[in-house]
Image (cartoon, rainbow, N blue to C red):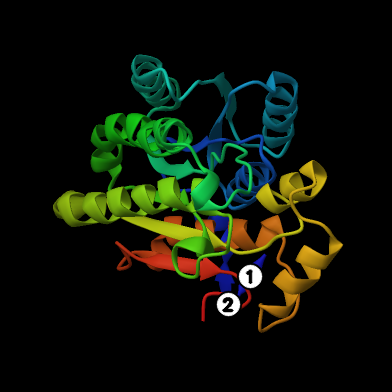
Amino acid sequence: MTEHGTDLTSDFSKRTGTALVVGGTGGLGAAICRELAVRGSDVALTYRGNEEAAQSLAADISEWGQRAWAVGLDLTNHDAARASADAIAEAAGGIHTLVYAAGPHVPQKHLSTVDPGEVREQLDVDAAGFFAVAQPTLPHLREVEGSIVAVTTAATRRFPVRDGLSSIPKAAVEAAIRGFAAEEGRFGVRANTVGPGMLTDGMAQRLMAAGDLDQRALEAARDNIPMRRFGVAADIAEAVCFLASDRARFITGQHLDIDGGFSI
């Protein structure tokens, strides 16, 4: 695979250690795992409940010639998150990239109907969960001047009605990423975020399956996108791999929306 004469398969082939993808069995996480492997990276992926999917994906990555690990992880268990990061680094000989692609399913509700406890729960699972796994990876990333890429949402730029339970914790993740970029840059560590818009897979697929988005809502969402179409998981994986690679070696603290222009 080449892009403007660049061999993308060598993006990570010379990196020490592995990429750690948190939430690797989701629609976006799995696409990111595959793209990292295609571009020469070993991949450690975490899952919360879908062990079968995780083991199957790890087997595919191994067949492509890269090392792979599938690790069960509940992000609300902060001690386990730290232990998992250290264990993966030891097994793989380091961690060169942390990708946070976890995204708990949340109902679409107007903020006026949301109980404060629901907000606290999402902040605990998503924002605090991200920090619980990101903070202990920092020593490993410093060793190799690695990077963090968090998958958040385009909704932090243009708020879709009823999306507060998703976008509020993702905004907190983005704030943490900017903090990591500001504080860890002196160690050569970069940190960036990618904001998916409406996709035909990932969270949007779950919302459609749950009935939170009907055909009329989908048409309205499409009309709000200048490109008049939805994206796919591969679009997000492409952006994540770019930001994690040395081709983005002077980019940190930035947010890149992959949304067909929705956030304009």
Question: SS of the residue at dot 1?
Answer: strand
The amino acid type of the residue labelled 1 equals Thr
Q: Are marks 2 and 1 in contact (CB under 8 Å)?
A: yes
Give the vertical position of 125 relative to 82 (above or below): below
Q: Residue furthest front?
A: 112
**Residue at left offset 29%, top offset 29%:** 136
Which quadrant holds the N terminus?
A: bottom right
Q: Nearer the viewer, residue 217 or 245?
A: 217
Residue 134 x/y as whole percent: 34, 36
The amino acid type of the residue labelled 2 equals Gly
> Quick check: 23 left or right of 157?
right
Residue 250 x/y as whole percent: 30, 68
The residue wearing badge 2 is: 5
Give the vertical position of 52 relative to 174 (above or below): above
Q: Nearer the viewer, residue 30 or 4?
A: 30
The residue wearing badge 1 is: 2
For marks 2 and 1, give the CA distance: 6 Å
> Quick check: 132 left or right of 223?
left
Q: Residues within 10 Å of mark 1 (few under 14, many from 20)?
A: few
Residue 38 in sight: yes
Residue 189 x/y as whole percent: 26, 50
**Residue at left offset 36%, top offset 33%:** 128
Give the vertical position of 242 relative to 142 (above or below): below
